[in-house]
Every structure is written in structure tokens, then in C-alpha cells.
Amino acid sequence: MLSLLVLRIAFLIRHPCRNATASAAIIAGGTLRYESQAMLQTAYHEKSEASSHPNGRMSTMVGAKRSVDFLKSVSAMETQVEPRRTTSYNNAANLDHPTLTFHRERASMNRSVSRRQFVSRSCGLLAGAAAAVGLSGAVLADSEKRSIAVTCRDGHLSVTGEKNCWAAMEKLGAEGVEATIGEDLSLPGLVHPSRKYTAATPEGVEQLVADMQAARRKITALCMYNRFDTRPEFEIQWCAKAAKAAQQLGVKAIRIDVVSHKIPPSKFLEFAVAAMKKVMEATESTGVAFGIENHGGTTNDPKFLTSLLDGVGSPRLGLTLDTGNFYWYGHPLSKVHEFFEAFASRVFHTHCKSIAFPAAEREKQRPMGWKYEQYTCPTDKGDIDFRRLVGILRKAGYANDLCVEDESLSHFPKPERAAVVQRELKFLKGLLS
């Protein structure tokens, strides 16, 4: 009995129910059939109501199924070791409180307990379970808040002066990194004093995974620099190889470029949709997401970006949201935050940077790139509202990273740059805690 009680309380800790009847049924072992059914339905439907956002909510239905399977396994164990029960009504006056008769295979006595007595005796157990659930709920809530990792681009690791990328991440306080992946599947931004990292071979993947685990750091995205309209077939093959590498490394997303180098802008959308469909087909087996960065003069246009994503129609194709680029393009600040909301459900990865324009310029439609070098700044000093951004992304179910990309570091003396990135990472962590 004690072991079964522990299992039931453990289930409630892992899967808190809003339905009190369901919680009681779990503790009580599903004494009445309808209580067990209510609990099963609650556990399933509460998990099923979340939408299927590809960043992480596609797995919700799987989690719900596992919850129900876990409960059924407890019930199966109970069937093997618990006494059989039947429900009977002793008289008309007792209709509201049926008697539960316990039939014990290895005991000669029968014991009857009214439902009212049962509920009374269960209060202590239920109170204890509720306390456990409350404690677990707080822990789970904090864990959910921190499910977004705070990272930086691999190019920022050099500001520490460290010759080991993992030591550099630790020094900065970065929980991971966006790693550039070369055409040969090398990872040149992940420096190490005694080896060069590559995802081109099983041995290379194994070594990189082992070092990530030892350092307790992760790669949250791979970064590719593409030229789809000048070498489309090569790019599709490269994307397929990179996606396979990402799958093996446990990387959620790949940042890609979809901008026009050769094809006239008036014809580029049609080309881009066809190219991205081919990329999705070539990488389907990996399940890896691709995030097109809002970048340059093409994908900073929200109409183009929406038409491209809708035209492809794949849940694995979305956005690498660069928080500064919409602003750089010339969009007013209020519009920039509206774009964050409009695209939040399609975000797979981020680049966090900011700009501090004069107050009189913030709500103007400015020329593309207007005085960017002068006004670009660290994430904690500019006009972009990162607290608002975090709320928007969380509401959309985002669960990958906030990746610092500070293009203002050249404004600071070299000895100060590591401290600037450290401060930015700490700032973003504070918004998540």
C-alpha cells in the first residue's frame, strides 16, 4: 500500500491536476470507477489543449499520452496487489453514500467503509499530496521560466582571450553558443587548444558531444551563410548535411540566409519559396528547424517574410528573429515590437542586439541602415524592450535561446569587451528568472 501511495503522489508531482476529484482519485487508487475516468480524462485533456507550436509544443501530446500510460501502469500494479472492491447500496437512506466493501483474498474478515468515512480518512493523505504538488509546481514553474537558454554567437568568445571555447563560455556566463558551420561541416568558431571541431565524421560528432557534456554547455543553433540564388543545388545539399549534423549534435535550429544576390527582387519570392520547399524535403527526416534571419533588404520586409513562410507552409521553417534588424531597416520602434508579436509563433532562434536612436527618430520611418554604426549599442542600453520580447516569446511557446549578437563592441576598448558581453548575458538572464 505504501509503495502504491508513493507512486500516486509521484504522479501528482510530475503531472499536477487542476481537478480536485482527479487528484483524490489518484491518491485513493480510483476507488470509484467514475473518479478514475475523470482523472484520466483530465490528465489527457489538460495536456492536449496546448497548441502544436513546433518549438516544443508538438511534444505536448506525447507527454499527455505518457501521463495516461503512467497512470494506467499504476492501476495495473494496483490490480495485482490490491484487494478487490465492489460497490453496494445498503438501503434507500444510504443512496448518496454507497458502502465500499473490500474483499481480501488472504483474509477471512470483510470490512465496510462508507464513502463519507473514506473521504474523511483520506484528508491527511490528500493534504500531504497537495503540499507536494505545490512544492513541485513551484519548481516546475521556475524550470519553465528558465527553459530559454542565454547564449552568444561564437564570434564573441574571442573577447575573453581564452583559447578554449568552453572556458570562454564559462567566463562570459553563456549557457551555450550559436556555432557557425562551414561548407565542410567544420565549426571554426569553437576554438580549442588541441583539436579542431567538425561534424563531418562520427568521431568528430562524438568528440564534440562529449566536450559539450563535460563543459555543461550546448549549441543552441548552427549558423549558415547561404547564397541560394547563385548556387541552389549546392545550398540544398549543404543544408541537408548541416541538418543531419544538427540532429546528431542535438541542436534545435539552423540559422539561414534567404536574400537576393543575383535574381531581381520582383522574381525572388517565387524562387525562394521553391528553394525552401526543396530544403524542407531534403531535411524532412531530421526534424531540425530552419530559421530565416530577418536580414538585409529582403527579409526585413515583413510582407515578403510572411509570403515566403506561408508559401512554403512547413512547420520546420520559421524565423531567426534578429531584434535589431527590423529597427535597422528603418521601421518605427512601435512597429518593430508589433513584428515581434506577429512572428513570435514562428521563431526558432534569436539574435539579440539593440540600437539607441535619438528620441525624435524612434517613431520615424528612417532610411535603411540610418546611422547604425553610430547608434548601435548593447542589449541593455538600447530602445528594444527585451522584457516585452521575453513575454511575447514565452506566450508563443518559444523554448530555445536568447543569443547575444552585439555589433557595438567596437565602440569599447578591447579590455572592456568581455565585461560588456557578460553584462548583457546577465541582463537577459534576469529577464528570464
Image (tube, rainbow, N blue to C red):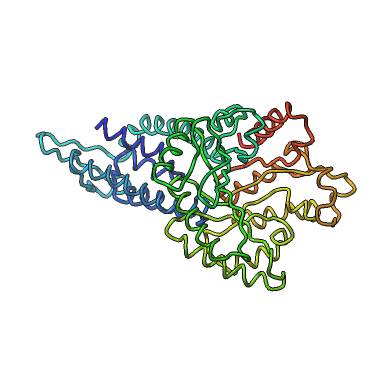
Indicate the position of residue 70 as horizontal and vertical percent values.
32, 45
Viewport quadrant of the C terminus: top right
Task: Report the front residue among 420 and 108.
Answer: 420
> Is 39 drawn above or below residue 233 in the view shown?
above
Asked if residue 46 can be seen in this view, the reply is no
Image label count: 0
Indicate the position of residue 325 as horizontal and vertical percent values.
73, 51
> Is 433 drawn above or below residue 295 in the view shown?
above
Quarter of image, res 3: top left
Viewport quadrant of the N terminus: top left
Indicate the position of residue 198 as horizontal and vertical percent values.
48, 43
Q: In the displayed structure, does residue 425 sit left or right of residue 217?
A: right
Residue drawn at x 53%, y 32% as measured from the top left: 192
Indicate the position of residue 228 as horizontal and vertical percent values.
60, 63
Asked if residue 141 can be seen in this view, the reply is yes
Residue drawn at x 56%, y 28% as measured from the top left: 167
Quarter of image, res 205: top left
Task: Report the front residue among 270 and 97.
Answer: 270
Residue drawn at x 18%, y 35% as measured from the top left: 111
> Is 295 drawn above or below residue 404 in the view shown?
below
Q: In the displayed structure, does residue 91 sit left or right of residue 427?
A: left
